[in-house]
Amino acid sequence: MNIEQGAELAVVQYNDKNGKDCVTIKKFDSQGKPDVAPGLARQLVTDKKIIGIVGPPFSGESEAANPIFNDAGIPLITPSATRVSLSSHGWKVFHRAVANDGAQGPGAANYIKNVLKATKVFVADDQSAYGAGLADVVKSTLGSLVAGTDKTDADGKQTDFSATVNKIVQSGATAFFYGGYYQNAGLLRKQLTAANWKGTLVAGDGVDDPGYATAAGNDAAAGTIVTCPCSPASKAGGSFVGDYKTKWGVDAGTYSDVAYDAMNIFLKGIDGGNTTPDKMLSYINSVNYSGVANTYKFTSTGELDPSLIKVWAFKFGTDGKTAPDQEIPKS
Amino acid sequence: MNFVGLLHSLGPLSIAGLAQGAIYALFALGYTLVYGVLRLINFAHSEVFLMGAYAALNVWGLFSLNQNSATPATVVVIGLLMLGLVAAIIASGATALVVELVAYRPLRRRNAPPLAFLITAIGASLVISEATGVFTHRSITGVPPLIRPADVVTFGNLHITNLQVLIIVLALVMMFGLDRFINTTRLGRGIRAVAQNPDSAALMGVNKNRVISLVFLLGGLMAGVAAVMYVLKIGTVKFDAGFDLGIVAFTAAVLGGIGNLRGALLGGLLLGVVENYAAEVFGTEYRRVIVFVLLIGVLMFLPTGLLGESLGKARA
């Protein structure tokens, strides 16, 4: 919804400027389901008027639908699918306008090192691909700052963390990175607070869930930092935030600004006379576009140029909700 | 392997382990009581516990308390704890009785083979836990902070909190009470008689069905207390909370000697402490590995568990 409205806003503004209905937007609703997406994708590629796609928004459906787009040669820019492996399939049409999940590890480590300025850090994970992956990157980035490590059971499979809590307290760490999801993280935070540990818990976007505050209680949850390979839409540049609110009556949500930019990349391509999928693809591959959320330049695998990747820190407040804290400095 | 860490943290790890072990122990009593009398494992016991936990939460919810409420005044807290305990005991006891009535008694009447009991027990367990999952949308429920942990004893790096003391003391009191009940009262004598020899007991005029119901009720009672201790300690409940705890508690019952009340206490406390030591030395991910290696090791030399004496033979 955020994404669709962001993209549509770009088209509406374009058409207002260039006379009615120069460009039309055609919507396909996959409901985010990997089993629905391929059917829609096949339908989409038969429409010869479509020269570019903003989406698909989710990683699971991307895995299912992108091969079809790739065979048809229709360029796509996803504003929000962040699974790392998406760029490793060799899809020549694939572009990602945000950082991938892999950017979170270095981001979290940099936050701990440069913002919290912690000198002793405890790192634990839940042995999942996501959690252990994040924790390993954090460990290697922090190096000698790591004061201790541990591994818990999978999310929701462990409730008593007294041994881990004891290790964290005894290690003297002032920051604790947890690679995992919100249930374990919430219980850990609650039990750490109960053991009178006053340091900061830092985690990836798997913890950015209201369930975290339910498990920990709002008081204990307050102050927890979660990273996101995204920027808050409210911080987007230009008149985007106001335009979005005027058009849709709601505040711009996560990734709506990126979708807006992605659509504008296509529109600018059309202005440049790239009106076939082939021409559009080679145009996007060499684009260097400054939008409201970021500047976009893609590598040969379709990822954002590393120098353009943004990772933001969000902080849990006493109301149990997250709010943007700051963009994490790169070093 | 971190043996230095273990030596350094021996105090805090032992206390935290005893508090967790106390919950295992009360939980394990349910398995041991039923096994002592019926020679079958009540796998639905984990849901007997679960119902107690939700009952306590619902009662506190009536006072519109949740995980974000402030801690009420001490007098109010004591009242709320009592109410929670009563609600949990009633819910757990009732669940245990219903499970006995629906899943076991009809089978017993038809002399069903032991395997049939096993599968109806697992069935009852899944029915209750999955139904709870549907009703709660499989999400976690937070617990009001009735007891703010505060240190009552501080000695070096050893901090004993009020909650840990409460849990351990409450478990020992419940355990002592149950032990006295089984060993000195008339009803307790009935339980021991049926455990020793059901047929002779029936001939001597013991009502077997009533004894069995009583045993389930007692197990439910203990599970209800364990449930309140659990929600206070952990701070959340989920529909599958009983499952993992049930496996560990069952292990504790076997370790101590299934059918033996004091064995369940010993097994529970021991498991709680061993889990914590193992987590410190090898890492938390290995704690269950070590626990089951210990169980197998003990059973190799003491096949009936540490105190391997059945309920019937237990002497005061």
Image (spheres, coloured by chain):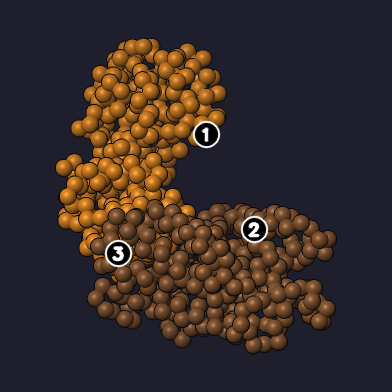
Chain colours: A orange, B brown
Is A110 or A313 nearer to us in this picture?
Answer: A110
State the image quarter where residue A86 is shown: top left
Quarter of the image where one finds residue B217 = bottom right
Q: Position of residue B37 (x, y in %)?
A: 69, 71
Q: Which residue is mark 3?
A: B6
Amino acid tagged 1: Lys
The one nearer the camera, B214 or A22, is: B214
- Residue under the image location 42 percent in, 72 percent down: B18
Please report, as a chain letter, where disc 2 is located. B
Q: Residues within 10 Å of mark 2 (few under 14, many from 20)?
A: many
Residue under circle 2? B125
Q: Nearer the viewer, residue B107 or A253?
A: B107
Q: Amino acid at mark 2?
A: Ser
| x, y percent for residue A31 | 52, 35
Q: Spot the residue most to the front.
A: B301
Secondary structure of residue under mark 1: loop
Asked if both marks, 1 and 2, belong to the same chain, the answer given is: no
Query: Tag on residue B276?
Result: none
Q: Residue at x 44, y 29 (%)?
A: A62
Q: CA distance from mark 1 to mark 2?
A: 32 Å
* Label 3 neighbour load within 10 Å: few <14, some 14-19, many 20+: many
Q: Position of residue B172 (x, y in %)?
A: 50, 80
> Image quadrant of residue A120?
bottom left
* Local SS, label 2: helix
Measure the C-alpha gap from mark 3 to mark 1.
48 Å
Q: Amino acid at mark 3?
A: Leu
